[in-house]
Amino acid sequence: MKSRVAKLFFLFAMILVLSACGAESKEDVLKKLSNKWVDTKGYELTAQMSILTGQEPRVYDVEVWHTKPDFYRVKVSDANAENTQMIVRNTEGVFVVTPALNKTYKFQSKWPTENSQAYLIGSLAQDIKKDKNSTFKEEGNQYIFETKTTNNHKNMLPSQKIYIDKKTLLPTDVSILNENKEEQIHIKFNQVSLGKTRAAGEYKIETPAAKAEGNTVEASAELENPVFETHYPVIKWDNVHLIDEKVLKVEDDKRVILTFSGDKDFTIVQQISNPTMSSTIPVFAPGDPVDLGVAIGAVTDQSLTWEQDGMSFFIASSSLSKEEMIEVASSMTVTGLK
């Protein structure tokens, strides 16, 4: 009897040992990811980003080029490729380009090192590495990390799940969650190609002068006769109310000014964007570029500007933080309630 019990105990112990040997730790997987993602000389990827905060999902195509050390080109287009924006980092600085409006803004910014972006795989690796309390599990053919976010949305979207294919060690999906663990943004990676690099000249900014010389970054879209529709923020803040709405005539168009007051005070100005007829020099933009999900804007301590669907928006406030302004901007919709 004792012999049989001893054998069973030994067998059970061996099963535990073998199981432990077969399971990889969070540290093991993180080391592999760091070696594969961060150490690569460059990469290119395509992805689909879905914004799930409205009544209907808004879907965008994302294309990324990265060449070490500091060259980036991120192109974001809506499903019909009618609205396109790019953010580019090259030897001259950081630029946000809106081809349909022929507008280019230049920033004195360290983007993206100060703002993690879920479609940049280097940022994902850093998020996993920084969060000492991140969770890790294996599920089917995937590794799943859940980490804190470190981007400009981190207060309203504090966590993310990063899904990684076990065989390729490449990301397949990122799910960005609110404080209730509800998915707000989903990124589906269609293709990730490591080791790809491009010459510095391919990160140059397209301007009419450069285009005439044949040096361009490909991007084109046309916004034909955008219709003015007043947008309102859909935010769940207690004791914050719309107290005034003014409509001003501006030449042949109009400008709407919304004033909110209460525990938080801010003003939103919106009007139709006017394409520039000729722009060979990028316009300097104060602050830092910020990804709003639906558009790329410029944020300072007291203001946020962006262009979306043929409209220009401006938020001004001395009482909102940067993250709160981003929350307002991200919630703007024509179906918002006054």
Image: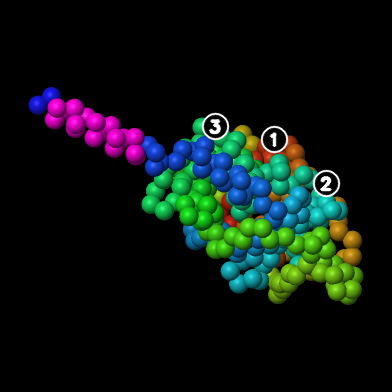
Label 3: which secondary element: loop
Q: Residue at x 41, y 45 (%)?
A: 138
Q: Is residue 238 left or right of residue 204?
A: left
Label 2: which secondary element: loop
Residue that lies at the very extreme toward the top in this rendered image: 2
Quadrant housing residue 76: bottom right
- Tell me the crowding category of disc 1: few under 14, some 14 to 19, or many 20 or more residues within 10 angstroms, Cα based: some
Q: Residue at x 87, y 66 (%)?
A: 279
> Where does label 1 land, which residue?
319
Q: Quadrant of the N terminus?
A: top left
Q: Is residue 26 left or right of residue 270?
A: left
> Where does label 2 land, which residue?
108
| Front in this rendered view, residue 318 or 63 | 63
Q: Does residue 189 appear in this view?
A: yes
In the rendered image, residue 107, in percent from the top left (x then y), is placed at: 81, 50
Give the label, 1 or 2, closer to the camera: 2
Sequence order check, earlier mark of 3 and 2: 2
Sequence order check, earlier mark of 1 and 3: 3
Q: Which residues are magenta?
A: 3-19
